[in-house]
Image (cartoon, rainbow, N blue to C red):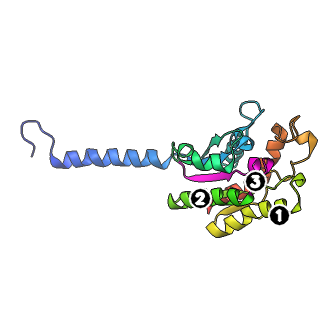
Amino acid sequence: MAYGGRPSIINIFAVLLVIFCISSDVNAKNPVKIVAIGDSLTAGYGLPQGEDFPSQLEAALREEGLDVVVENAGVSGDTSTGGLQRLDWALGNGADFVILELGANDALRGIDPEKTRENLDQILQILADKNLPVLLAGMKAPPNMGQEYTQEFDQIFPDLAKKHDTDFYPFFLEDVAAIPELNQSDYIHPNAQGVKIIVDNMLPYVISFIEN
């Protein structure tokens, strides 16, 4: 029995239980959050709003019935050094999964592949320490960098994927690189159609990544 109009302990417990159940239900409905960390290829350099890689990927995943948000943490001009320096910022809003696309600018600038490897290795280790699953997107050096540089650079990505046991997509620009009609006038950055092909190619990898 309650005295002085005060609720009983049982009633208080019932109210708290209802609040807990409502809160749990809301949290259960939160979408999965993927943070795409990268350079201009992720940021969407030169593309209309909504045509960048994260936006098109999110739309494609939702068409597959997946409740997913893809956050654009791409910065045009970023190298692997820049990506490492801003990693905490990129993850500032939280993440469930990470897609890592860095290295293209390192190759374009002729940065020592060992430096690129060291930076990406550190990024992957930090993400592992945070228990964040990573899909590593591979990159390839442009052919004008020479055979030795190209071999050393291209090997970075499969090596690190194996070392850190991450999901791996071998080449971010597969079926798009060096195809004029799929790139902007600089022949470096994909146009909207080029991004669509990238997304179509990567979609099975991403679905497997977030479902397994």
Image coordinates of residue 93 in percent, x first then y, are 51, 42
In magenta, the rendered stretch is 95-112
Q: Which residue is mark 1?
A: 151
Q: Nearer the viewer, residue 157 or 208?
A: 157
- For discs 3 and 1, the disc positioned in front in the rendered view: 1
Q: Residue placed at 77% from the left, 52% from the top?
A: 172
Q: Is residue 156 above or below residue 96?
A: below
Query: Are dots 1 and 2 in contact, CB under 8 Å?
Result: no
Kind of residue indicated by mark 2:
Gln
Q: Is residue 103 above or below residue 56?
A: below
Q: Residue placed at 54% from the left, 49% from the top?
A: 95
Image coordinates of residue 144 in percent, x first then y, are 90, 52
Please tell me whether mark 1 sits on a helix, a strand or a loop: helix
Can residue 36 be seen in this snapshot?
no
Please tell me whether mark 2 sits on a helix, a strand or a loop: helix
Q: As drawn, is 71 to the left or to the right of 3?
A: right
Q: Which residue is mark 3?
A: 202
Q: Dot 1: within a 10 Å radius of its alpha carbon, few (fewer than 14), some, or many (20 or more) residues?
A: some
Q: Is residue 123 above or below residue 30?
A: below
Does 51 lie within the magenta span? no
Q: Which residue is mark 2?
A: 122
Pick the quarter of the image with the C terminus.
bottom right
Q: Nearer the viewer, residue 193 or 154?
A: 154
Q: Dot 3: within a 10 Å radius of its alpha carbon, few (fewer than 14), some, or many (20 or more) residues?
A: some
Image coordinates of residue 56 in percent, x first then y, are 73, 41
Kind of residue indicated by mark 1:
Gln
Mark 3–mark 1 Cα distance, whole angstroms, equals 24 Å
Q: Nearer the viewer, residue 59 or 202?
A: 202
Q: As drawn, is 47 to the left or to the right of 9?
A: right
Q: Dot 2: within a 10 Å radius of its alpha carbon, few (fewer than 14), some, or many (20 or more) residues?
A: some
Mark 2–mark 3 Cα distance, whole angstroms, equals 24 Å
Image coordinates of residue 175 in percent, x first then y, are 87, 52
